[in-house]
Amino acid sequence: MPQWIHLGTLLRPHGIRGELCMEWYADSPFLMDAPLRLQLGQRPPYSVRIVSHRLHKGRPLVTLEGVDDRTAAEALRGARLLIHRDSLPAPEDDEIYVEDLLGCAVLLSDGSRLGRLDHVEYPAPDKEIWSIHTDDGKEVLFPAEACFIEGFDLSDPDAPTVTIAPPPGLLDIYLHDSA
């Protein structure tokens, strides 16, 4: 299991004093006060501290220590905020951290393998889209809503699985071979 969990993504500068708009994936704003790391691209993550945060049009705006102007904020666009797993509450029995599912096998209700979970996109607050890569190289974008997720099996750490029941017609869109 990964030790660092992706908590949010810095989007764009807001104003001229270094404030950044952020996509926040956690339920609690209090996690912004925990020790965090910032990762820009594939560079190694480094410690960062949020010195202030507020909501603006339903999305958090943050100011990071040492980021004092728009140019410095712009350089952080797309950076990921990470939190150590030990700083998070344990998930409930029917919950799991998405980071723990990345790379796992994705099965359909009948037990057949669809592919593997490659990455997650967050097109809107409280919305997740899973990018599932099939064994023959196709991508399926799956709306990760509770009604379409049947369960997880992480009992074998070398072969974790998630079982899904896609909405009718979804797989036809992605898996249909056009001639």
Image: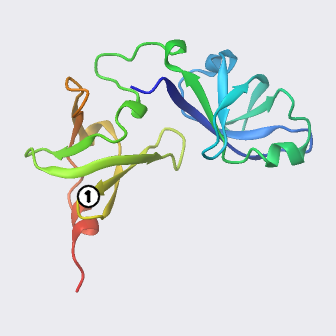
The amino acid on which the numbered mark 1 sits, given as a three-letter code, is Thr
Q: Residue at x 29, y 64 (%)?
A: 137
Of the 4 image quadrants, the one containing the C terminus is bottom left
- Percent of width and height locating residue 167: 24, 53
Of the 4 image quadrants, the one containing the N terminus is top left
Q: Residue furthest left?
A: 110
Q: Residue at x 54, y 27 (%)?
A: 26
Question: Disc 1 on helix, strand or loop?
Answer: strand
Category of crowding for the residue at label 1, using alpha-carbon neighbours closer than 10 angstroms: few (below 14), some (14–19), many (at least 20)? some
Residue 143 drawn above or below residue 8: below
Q: Residue at x 69, y 16 (%)?
A: 33
Q: Residue at x 22, y 77 (%)?
A: 177
Q: Is residue 63 left or right of residue 142?
A: right
As rendered, which of 58 and 50 lies closer to the eye?
Answer: 50
- Percent of width and height locating residue 103: 33, 42
Q: Residue furthest front?
A: 44
Q: Is residue 80 left or right of residue 129?
A: right
User: Residue under circle 1?
Assistant: 134
Image quarter of residue 7:
top right
- Percent of width and height locating residue 168: 20, 57
Q: Is residue 103 left or right of residue 10?
A: left
Q: Is residue 23 left or right of residue 151?
A: right
As rendered, which of 15 and 101 lies closer to the eye?
Answer: 101
Q: Residue furthest bottom?
A: 179
How many numbered discs sit on the rendered protein?
1
Residue 126 drawn above or below residue 52: below
